[in-house]
Image (cartoon, helix red, strand yellow):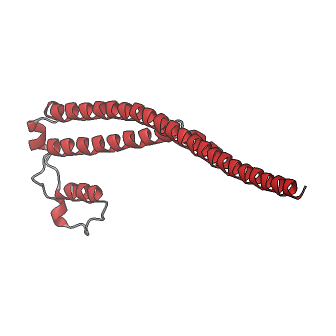
Amino acid sequence: MRYLLIVLLALLALAAGVMRWQQDHIQRLADDVAKAQIQAVIAGFETSAARADVHVITQYVDRERVVRQVIHTIQRETPRYVTPRTDAAFPLPVGFVRLHDAAAAADLPGPPGAADAQASGVTASDAAVVIAGNYGTCHAIREQLNALIDRLQMPPYREAALDE
């Protein structure tokens, strides 16, 4: 009877050990499944983001190309609108050039003087080409910002923002 009790206790201890090992094994498997699910969600997020990025970038590049083509056409056609005769008849004053350069640099010009009223070597057609280029850059940056806004309003960023 005593041996039977020892054998039963040994079997009971062995069963408890096996159950503990099995519980640890099941917990590790559950952790692995949870990690795999997280990785799947991350991969889905990245895939969705990559698809959306390609779409937005393609739209942005197309819009930016149109802006650049329009600006290039305007610059190329400037002599038709501001002829050399007009350039000779209406020279730009030094003050205009100084103000334009100050605005381009986002800096205040120095105090005005008598020299500001004199004619500069910059023609109206030259100024028109530069100003058109500046507006083109402004429009290209606007398109880039619109593309960024569009991208942030698309999944998965939109869902992430709604979850917060």
Q: Quadrant of the N terminus?
A: bottom right
Residue 40 picture location, percent across and down? 54, 38
Viewer-nearest residue: 45 or 25: 25
Left or right of residue 130: residue 154: right
Residue 94 picture location, percent across and down? 17, 58
Residue 124 in the image: above or below residue 106: above
Left or right of residue 102: residue 20: right
Residue at left offset 19%, top offset 46%:
127
Residue 128 picture location, percent across and down? 20, 42
Viewer-nearest residue: 157 or 25: 25
Left or right of residue 23: residue 86: left
- Corner quadrant of residue 100: bottom left
- Corner quadrant of residue 37: top right
Residue 29 picture location, percent across and down? 62, 44
> Which residue is outermost to the right?
1
Residue at left offset 29%, top offset 44%:
137
Viewer-nearest residue: 92 or 148: 148
Report how many numbered discs are placed on residues in the image. 0
Residue at left offset 15%, top offset 30%:
80
Viewer-nearest residue: 11 or 116: 11
